[in-house]
Image (spheres, rainbow, N blue to C red):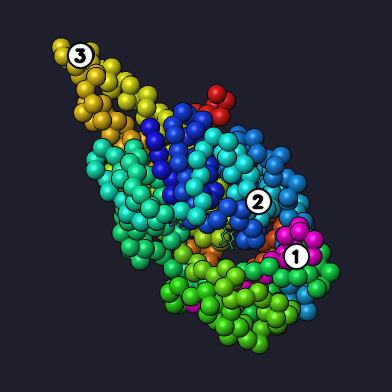
C-alpha cells in the first residue's frame, strides 16, 4: 500500500514513521524548504511525549529544552503577580514534560524517518481525483502520480481539506483572537522565565529559545476579523494594535524583523463532521485544530497519526481475513482470490474501516479539548480592566497545588493511548 502524506509537520512525519514501521510505504510532500528554523515554543507532555518515547527520540529532544523554570504573569513594571512554577507544573502534568521549540520536535521526527521515507521538500499538491480504486494526484512541481490513499497533514489551512472536503470557512471556528510571533535579541539579560503581560484586548509574551541571546516575542490580540493578513502588512497591523502598550512592548516592537518574517495567524479551530472521504483522510490540525490555548495540538496530532497508522495496519489484516473468508465461501475460490477487482473491493472496505476506527478513537478526545480551549480562550485576553482584574485574581488563586487536578483536567495531561496499542512500537 502506498500512501501520500501532504504536510511534513508533526502529524505528517509521525504518520510516515509508524506507517513505515508497519510495512506501508509513505511518501511525504512538504511545502516548506528543508531545514526550517525559528518558529515558536511548545509544551510537550502526555500522549505526544508517550509516542515520542515509543519512537526513541526523547534523547534527541532533551538537550534542546527551553530554559524556562516558571511562567510569570507580570505587571507593567515586570513584577510577577501570579507564577506557575516548575514544581506546580509537575503536579499538574504528573509525568515527563518538555518545553521545546516546535522546530526541534519536527527536526527529531525528520531524523527518525529520513533514512527510509521519501520526503519531497518544496512540493505540494494541486489537484486530487479519487477514482474509487486509487487517488490520482497532480503536483505543483509537475507530474501526476497514483497512490492508494492520501492523508492531509497540512495543518490548519489544509490544502488537502480544501481539495477533498470543501473550503476552509465551512469548517473554521474563529476564536476572536490573532497571534503573532518573532525572535528578538535579548537586550534584557533575560532569565529562565516565560513572562505574560496583559492589557485589555492584548497580551505580550516573552521567553528564551535556548539559543544564546535569542528570545521569542509572542503577541495575542482580540480581532473579530478572521481574514488572512498579507505578510507585507503584518508589522503595520501589529504596531497599530500594540500602540501605547506598556511593559517592554515598545522595545519588542522596535526589534521586530521584516514584516515578511513575522508569523501571524488567527486563533482558529477546525470542526468537521467527518475526517475522511473515500480514499482521503485528514490528521492533526487539518481536521481537529484546537489552537495553542489547549497546549495539546502536538499531542493530538501525534496521537491521530499513530492511531491512523495502527488502524491502517490492522485493516490490512482485515483485508487478508476478508479475502480468506470470501475464498472459502465461494466455489470459484482461486479466481476470486486472484481477481484484482475483488481484491480492490476488499481493500477499499479495509481502508474505510481503518478511517472509521481512527476517527472513532480520536474525534471525541479532540472535541473535548476544543471545548476546553474555547472556554479558556474567552478569558485569555480580557476585553476590559474589570476582566483583567478578575483574571489576575483568578491566576493568583489557581496557581496553587490544591488546583492542580482542575488544571490537569483543563489541559488533558493524561496520555490517551489505548493499552492495546502499547506494543505497536515493539516490532
Ligand atoms: C504560537 C503557537 C503555540 C503553540 N503551542 C502549543 C503547545 O504548547 N503545545 C501543543 O501541543 N501545541 C501547541 N500549538 C499547536 C501545535 O503547534 C499544532 O497543533 C501542531 O503543530 C499541529 O501539527 P500538524 O502537523 O497537524 O500541523 P502543522 O504543525 O501546522 O504542520 C503542517 C505542515 O504541513 C505543511 N504544509 C502546509 N500546507 C501545505 C501544502 N499545501 N502542501 C504541503 N505541505 C503543506 C506545513 O509547512 C507544515 O510543515 C501551538 C501553536 C502555535 C501557533
Residue for badge 3: 333
Is 412 situated above or below 336? below
Q: What element carries label 1?
A: strand
Q: Residue 213 colored magenta?
A: yes
Give the residue pinned by disc 1.
214
Asked if one can make out residue 414 in the rendered structure from this viewpoint, the answer is no
Q: In which quarter of the image is the C terminus?
A: top right
Image quarter (top left, top right, bottom left or bottom right) of the N terminus: top left
Q: How crowded is mark 3: few (under 14 residues within 10 Å), some or many (20 or more)?
A: some
Residue 237: x, y in percent? 55, 81
Q: Which of 36 and 374 is in front in this view?
A: 36
For disc 2, the neighbor class at 10 Å (few under 14, some 14 to 19, many from 20) is many
Using the image, determine if residue 413 lies above or below residue 375: above
Q: Which mark is residue 104?
A: 2
Residue displayed at 47% across by 45% down = 28
Q: Do the residues labelled 3 and 1 touch (CB within 8 Å)?
A: no
The magenta-colored residue range is: 206-223
| Label 2 vs 3, first from the N-terminus | 2
Please identify the quarter of the rendering in which residue 69 is found. bottom right
Residue 8, given in percent of the width and then of the height, sits at 51, 49
Q: Residue at x 58, y 79 (%)?
A: 235
What main secondary structure does the magenta stretch of the protein show?
strand
Vertical arrangement, residue 391 with respect to residue 121, above or below? below
Q: Residue furthest front?
A: 142
Residue 231, given in percent of the width and then of the height, sits at: 52, 74
Amino acid at each position: 500500500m502506498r500512501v501520500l502524506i501532504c504536510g511534513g509537520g508533526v502529524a505528517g512525519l509521525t504518520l510516515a514513521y509508524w506507517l513505515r514501521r508497519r510495512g506501508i510505504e509513505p511518501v511525504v510532500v512538504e511545502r516548506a524548504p528543508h531545514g526550517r528554523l525559528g518558529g515558536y515554543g511548545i509544551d510537550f507532555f502526555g500522549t505526544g511525549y508517550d509516542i515520542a518515547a515509543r519512537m526513541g527520540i526523547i534523547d534527541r529532544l532533551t538537550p534542546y529544552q527551553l530554559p524556562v523554570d516558571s511562567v510569570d504573569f507580570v505587571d507593567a513594571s515586570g513584577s510577577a503577580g501570579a507564577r506557575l512554577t516548575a514544581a506546580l507544573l509537575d503536579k499538574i502534568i504528573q509525568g515527563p514534560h518538555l518545553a521545546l521549540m516546535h522546530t526541534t520536535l519536527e527536526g527529531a521526527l525528520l531524523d527518525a524517518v529520513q533514512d527510509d521515507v521519501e520526503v519531497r521538500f518544496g512540493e505540494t499538491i494541486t489537484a486530487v481525483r479519487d477514482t474509487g480504486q486509487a487517488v490520482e494526484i497532480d503536483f505543483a512541481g509537475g507530474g501526476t502520480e497514483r497512490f492508494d490513499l492520501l492523508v492531509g497533514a497540512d495543518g490548519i489551512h489544509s490544502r488537502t481539506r480544501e481539495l477533498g472536503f470543501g473550503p476552509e470557512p465551512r469548517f473554521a471556528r474563529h476564536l476572536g483572537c490573532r497571534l503573532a510571533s518573532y525572535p528578538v535579541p535579548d537586550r534584557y539579560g533575560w532569565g529562565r522565565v516565560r513572562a505574560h503581560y496583559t492589557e485589555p484586548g492584548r497580551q505580550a509574551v516573552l521567553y528564551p529559545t535556548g539559543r544564546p541571546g535569542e528570545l521569542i516575542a509572542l503577541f495575542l490580540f482580540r480581532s473579530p476579523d478572521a481574514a488572512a493578513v498579507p505578510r507585507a502588512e503584518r508589522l503595520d497591523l501589529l504596531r497599530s494594535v500594540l500602540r501605547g502598550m506598556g511593559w517592554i512592548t515598545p522595545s519588542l516592537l522596535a526589534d521586530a524583523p521584516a514584516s515578511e518574517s513575522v508569523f501571524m495567524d488567527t486563533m482558529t479551530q477546525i470542526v468537521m463532521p467527518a475526517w475522511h472521504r473515500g480514499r482521503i483522510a485528514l490528521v492533526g490540525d487539518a481536521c481537529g485544530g484546537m489552537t495553542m490555548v489547549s497546549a495539546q495540538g502536538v499531542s493530538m496530532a501525534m496521537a491521530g497519526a499513530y492511531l491512523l497508522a495502527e488502524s491502517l495496519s490492522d485493516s490490512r489484516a482485515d483485508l487478508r481475513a476478508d479475502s480468506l473468508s470470501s475464498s472459502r465461501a465461494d466455489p470459484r475460490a482461486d479466481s476470486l482470490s486472484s481477481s484484482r477487482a475483488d481484491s480492490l473491493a476488499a481493500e477499499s472496505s479495509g481502508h474505510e474501516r481503518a478511517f472509521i476506527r481512527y476517527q472513532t478513537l480520536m474525534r471525541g478526545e479532540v472535541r473535548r479539548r476544543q471545548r476546553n480551549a474555547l472556554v479558556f480562550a474567552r478569558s485569555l485576553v480580557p476585553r476590559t480592566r474589570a476582566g483583567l482584574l478578575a483574571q489576575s485574581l483568578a491566576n493568583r488563586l489557581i496557581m496553587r497545588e490544591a488546583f492542580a487536578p482542575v488544571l490537569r483536567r483543563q489541559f488533558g495531561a493524561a496520555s490517551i493511548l489505548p493499552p492495546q496499542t502499547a506494543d505497536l512500537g515493539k516490532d
